[in-house]
């Protein structure tokens, strides 16, 4: 896999024309794009189709973090795969093993299924506030990642700071999709657990998700190329 295909550019915008323009400009550079809840709730399936039409050659990660009863999640996964054939989809590991197995069974052969462990916007204090008493962020991530692997999924979405931990506990073939990536000098925004792109890949990340440092740059394609150059030279 080349470095170009390892970065999924996050098109998290409520402006469809802007998303299509970004897809057309950045997609050929990174080879991969991500659309999430903000985008899909704004534009629906037609918006996803518009992004695919703007850059048909780019791999697509549809980041909707499904979390519901097993039958409902399986139906959602089946519908998305049939209509869009994405490279990646995801669910919440907190939905449990039965839900994850049902989702994996519903996945098309060409789509890899990931699970979200702990959102990268949560730090230890916030984790305790939502009920994970007595567990560190790392403990919770490790436990949920192991459950994900046992359920037959392809990998997890995790913080860069948990890459080494998950490589050790889940092995070299378990995919790690890593958001919260900030190149040197970039604003952290609402991400609490972040790392630079070269450092994350060196630690063992399979793919990186990078949004604002690319999409909010004056020249998004140039920003993407600069990140790839940084990776290539490290």
Image (cartoon, helix red, strand yellow):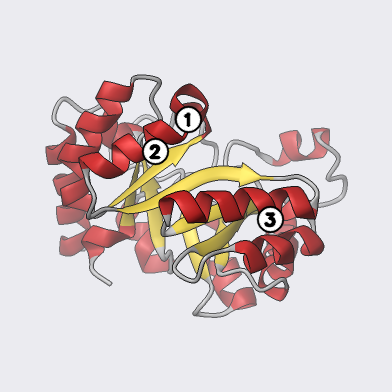
Give coordinates of residue 118: x percent, y percent.
66, 48
User: Cα distance, mark 3 to mark 1?
Assistant: 19 Å
Q: Are marks 2 and 1 in contact (CB under 8 Å)?
A: yes
When the figure is inspected, residue 82 is found, relative to residue 166, above or below; the finding is above
**Quarter of the image with the N terminus in it:** bottom left
Where 32 falls versus 11 (above or below)?
Answer: below
Mark 3 or mark 2: whose residue is earlier in sequence? 2
Instruction: Give the residue at x 59% y 55%.
Output: 78
- Image coordinates for residue 24, horizontal then vertical, percent: 18, 39
Q: Residues within 10 Å of mark 3 (few under 14, many from 20)?
A: many
State how far apart marks 2 and 1 are (Cα): 7 Å
Above or below, 69 against 11 in this view is below
- Per the image, the residue denoted by label 1 is 44
At horizontal 35% and vertical 39% (from top left) the residue drawn is 49
Marks 3,1: beta carbons within 8 A? no
Query: Which numbered marker is on residue 74?
Result: 3
């Amino acid at each position: 896999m080349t470095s170009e295909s390892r970065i999924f550019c996050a098109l998290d915008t409520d402006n469809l024309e802007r998303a299509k323009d970004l897809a057309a400009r950045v997609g050929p550079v990174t080879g991969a794009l991500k659309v999430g809840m903000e985008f899909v709730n704004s534009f629906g399936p037609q918006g996803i189709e518009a992004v695919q039409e703007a850059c048909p050659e780019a791999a697509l990660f549809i980041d909707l973090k499904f979390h519901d009863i097993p039958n409902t999640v399986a139906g959602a996964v089946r519908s998305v795969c049939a209509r869009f054939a994405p490279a990646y989809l995801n669910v919440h590991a907190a939905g449990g093993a039965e839900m994850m197995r049902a989702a994996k069974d519903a996945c098309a052969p060409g789509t890899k299924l990931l699970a979200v462990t702990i959102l990268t916007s949560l730090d230890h204090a916030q984790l305790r506030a939502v009920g994970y008493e007595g567990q560190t962020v790392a403990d919770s991530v490790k436990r949920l990642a192991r459950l994900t692997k046992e359920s037959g999924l392809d990998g997890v979405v995790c913080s860069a700071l948990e890459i080494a931990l998950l490589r050790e506990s889940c092995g070299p073939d378990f995919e790690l999709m890593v958001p919260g990536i900030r190149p040197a000098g970039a604003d952290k925004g609402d991400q609490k657990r972040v790392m630079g792109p070269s450092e994350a890949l060196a630690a063992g990340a399979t793919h990186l998700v990078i949004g604002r440092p690319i999409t909010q740059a004056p020249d998004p394609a140039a920003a993407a190329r600069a990140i790839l150059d940084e990776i290539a030279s490290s």
